[in-house]
């Protein structure tokens, strides 16, 4: 099978393209999607699939979300494009009270087979309403899958799985990584949910992360290696389900755990990972366990203020050193 | 030519529009130079709407705006230095570097904020009107939003609410025919914003938003009605956004002929021509424009030279109780 080097945005474009070619019930709705989407993630979809399957909608987030659900109930597979994660706030009822509950509430009669795409994260000084990472909210929400890829290949493979999934999938495109390139197979195979990817093998410290902060984490891991601290680096890729086994197995080996996320540290998913590992291995099996996230402040606009909020390679290195004492 | 417009008023309107144009032109240039970070949404071509409406407001009146809010802020009297510094993300910005262009605000002049969420300002204006009414103020609220915003629930909810509680709010729909990169008519059913307002009991009228005198006249009347307790009103101002959606959007999808035609209806040029027909010397007309340009060039120079905000400022203004201290644990 041939591979090609493409940007992350092209990788997810190819994945959606492949699935729309494979399955005529897959379609996409959202603002400006017929024009190719805000980032070009649906470029050239309109000429190939037509306006019935590539639906540029009004600025009506609650109906984009709710109509996506309705269309799933009659057997189609909508990709619901939210443009920028923060606008999902305008569709919270449809997501939280309807999509996430409908299968359970109706005793298994409903099949909410939707993919909700929500490009999230800090991005080009876009300030507090266009920069949020709130993925942990949705891990707390029963009924949904939470996908947080960081590489072109993972994003493509997980998007394929998401589109084929009967469960509602919250797919967090890491918008700041859209230009990052990587190899993607010409036929994109699905990647199962709940399987972490080992980025680096090491025996000193288990480092766990996901989504747009991954390049900073990898950079930190390289710095630490130069200092003689070899990290076992895992990209969780999906937060629900998440690869608890892989993380625990790694910490069993290293005895130390650091979880890093772009999101606010307080009540972030890092807390869940740390607590789960402590529960599974017992406090005696662990020498250190901590999280590193953003301070509990909104994302500010000005570059020096935004930098103050961001989790950086330096901060990750410092936190990692802290766990080695 | 409208008789009620004496030369003094025309000059006032002209000067206000020139200031908005000069501010945004200077900001666009600075953004292209890379000294203004983040997205920049300018309203070049739409200045007649902000101007014609806000010049009928009092200092105590409040406005809310959308993502394209520089003009609304300036016309309402927001300080230029604080605005430009905010766009640059420098110390001394109205929002202390936390908001930037998309969240420009100057509460000291009743400008309650631009908004990064389409139609986000509508319920806020309605609530401001409710609070003003409750406290027996004679101030009113004005809400600026685009034609793209009328397809979100808050528009319908807000109008219904304002009519139901008979609130002193003027809704101003800046109808530039587009929403981001899409022609609004392609995603909007029915006869439009006026009919929607009417169906909820909010009387509305349409003006040519590129004719600042028409906007001034209509807004003056509607503001007076709203202020006198007649309930909410809606003004639809048809206009044209000459530039793209954001500073990085060349709007190449538009027919160049359409843009060229729109430029012939430029509200500033139109008024300059009228001023000259009414006997104002060319030197005076040019002088107003160059004074605005000089003011904004100075604001840019000031912002460029201003220091960056201290990191610790990022931790201010979060909340009173339970805020994270700078350097403390998250
Ligand atoms: C709730 C929400 N959905 C989508 C967006 C993205 N967006 C920003 S501006 C815009 C178009 C708004 O059109 P309109 O209100 O007509 O204003 P214009 O840009 O034409 O001035 C869109 C879709 C947003 N900011 N908020």
Image: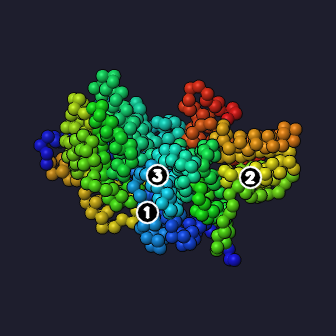
Using the rendered view, name the quadrant where residue B82 is placed. Answer: top left
Q: Nearer the viewer, residue A156 or A225?
A: A156
Q: Earlier in the sequence, mark 3 or mark 2?
A: 3
- For the residues beneath circles 3 and 2, the answer to whether they share a chain is yes
Q: Circles 2 and 1: CB distance less than 8 Å?
A: no
Residue denoted by label 1: A55
The answer to whether residue B256 is seen in the rendering is yes
Q: CA distance from mark 3 to mark 1?
A: 14 Å
Chain assignment, label 3: A
- For the residues beneath circles 2 and 1, the answer to whether they share a chain is yes
Chain assignment, label 2: A
The answer to whether residue A117 is seen in the rendering is no
Q: Is residue B99 above or below residue A209?
A: above
Q: Nearer the viewer, residue B114 or B283?
A: B114
Q: Earlier in the sequence, mark 2 or mark 1?
A: 1
Residue denoted by label 3: A66
Left or right: where B42 falls relative to A42: left
Q: Position of residue B200 (x, y in %)?
A: 27, 42
Residue denoted by label 2: A243
Could you tell me which residue is drawn at 61 percent across and 27 percent down? Answer: B322
Is the residue indicated by label 2 positioned so its CB lies within 8 Å of ligand 1? no
Could you tell me which residue is drawn at 66 percent across and 69 percent down? Answer: A189
Q: Nearer the viewer, residue A138 or B12?
A: A138
Q: Nearer the viewer, residue B71 or A138?
A: A138
Left or right: where A153 falls relative to A105: right
Q: CA distance from mark 3 to mark 2?
A: 31 Å
Q: CA distance from mark 2 to mark 1?
A: 35 Å
Check residue A74 in the rendering and tell me which mark sits there, or answer none. none
Could you tell me which residue is drawn at 71 percent across and 40 percent down? Answer: A271
């Amino acid at each position: 099978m041939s591979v090609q080097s493409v940007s992350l945005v092209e990788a997810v474009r190819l994945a959606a393209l492949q699935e729309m070619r494979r399955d005529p019930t897959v379609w996409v709705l959202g603002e400006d999607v017929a024009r190719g989407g805000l980032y070009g993630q649906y470029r050239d979809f309109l000429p190939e699939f037509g306006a019935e399957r590539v639906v540029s909608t009004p600025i009506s987030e609650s109906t984009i979300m709710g109509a996506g659900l309705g269309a799933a109930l009659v057997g189609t597979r909508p990709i619901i494009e939210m443009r920028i994660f923060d606008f999902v706030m305008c569709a919270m009822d449809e997501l939280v009270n309807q999509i996430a509950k409908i299968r359970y509430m109706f005793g298994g009669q409903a099949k909410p087979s939707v993919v909700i795409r929500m490009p999230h994260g800090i991005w080009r000084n876009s300030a507090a309403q266009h920069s949020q990472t709130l993925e942990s909210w949705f891990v707390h929400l029963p009924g949904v899958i939470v996908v947080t890829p960081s590489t072109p290949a993972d994003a493509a493979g997980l998007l394929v799985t998401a589109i084929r999934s009967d469960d509602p999938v919250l797919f967090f495109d890491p918008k700041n990584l859209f230009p990052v390139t990587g190899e993607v197979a010409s036929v994109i195979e699905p990647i199962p949910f709940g399987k972490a990817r080992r980025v680096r093998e090491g025996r000193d410290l288990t480092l766990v992360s996901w989504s747009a902060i991954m390049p900073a984490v990898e950079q930190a891991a390289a710095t630490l290696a130069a200092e003689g601290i070899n990290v076992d680096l895992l990209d969780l890729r999906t937060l629900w389900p998440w690869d608890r086994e892989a993380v625990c197995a790694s910490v069993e080996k290293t005895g130390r755990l650091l979880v890093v996320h772009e999101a606010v540290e307080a009540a972030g998913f890092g807390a869940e990972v740390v607590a789960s590992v402590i529960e599974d291995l017992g406090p005696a099996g662990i020498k250190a366990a901590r999280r590193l996230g953003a301070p509990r402040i909104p994302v500010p606009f000005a570059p020096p203020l935004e930098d103050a909020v961001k989790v950086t390679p330096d901060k990750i290195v410092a936190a990692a050193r802290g766990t080695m004492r | 030519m409208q008789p009620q417009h004496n030369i003094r008023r025309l000059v006032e309107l002209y000067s206000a529009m020139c200031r908005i144009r000069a501010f945004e032109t200077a900001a666009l240039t600075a953004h292209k130079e890379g000294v203004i970070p983040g997205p920049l949404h300018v309203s070049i071509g739409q200045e007649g709407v902000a101007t014609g409406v806000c010049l009928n407001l009092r200092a105590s009146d409040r406005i809310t705006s959308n993502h394209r809010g520089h003009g609304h802020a300036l016309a309402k009297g927001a300080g230029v230095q604080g605005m430009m510094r905010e766009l640059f993300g420098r110390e001394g910005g109205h929002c202390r570097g936390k908001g930037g262009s998309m969240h420009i605000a100057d509460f000291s002049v009743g400008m309650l904020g631009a908004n990064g969420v389409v139609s986000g300002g509508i319920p806020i204006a309605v609530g401001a009107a409710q609070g003003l009414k409750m406290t027996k103020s004679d101030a009113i609220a004005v809400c600026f939003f685009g034609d793209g915003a009328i397809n979100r629930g808050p528009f319908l909810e807000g109008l219904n609410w304002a009519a139901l509680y008979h609130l002193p709010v003027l809704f101003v729909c800046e109808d530039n025919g587009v929403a981001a990169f899409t022609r609004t008519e392609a995603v909007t059913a029915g006869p439009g914003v006026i009919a929607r307002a009417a169906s909820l009991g909010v009387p509305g009228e349409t003006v040519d938003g590129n004719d600042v005198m028409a906007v001034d006249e209509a807004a003056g009347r509607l503001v007076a009605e709203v202020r006198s307790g007649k309930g909410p009103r809606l003004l639809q101002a048809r206009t044209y956004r000459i530039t793209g959606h954001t500073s990085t959007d060349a709007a190449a999808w538009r027919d160049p002929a359409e843009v060229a035609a729109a430029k012939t209806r430029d509200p500033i040029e139109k008024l300059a021509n009228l001023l000259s027909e009414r006997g104002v010397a060319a030197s005076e007309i040019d002088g107003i424009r160059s004074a605005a340009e000089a003011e904004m060039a100075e604001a840019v120079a000031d912002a460029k030279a201003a220091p960056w905000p201290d990191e610790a400022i990022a931790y201010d203004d979060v909340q009173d109780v339970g805020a994270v201290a700078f350097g403390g644990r998250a």
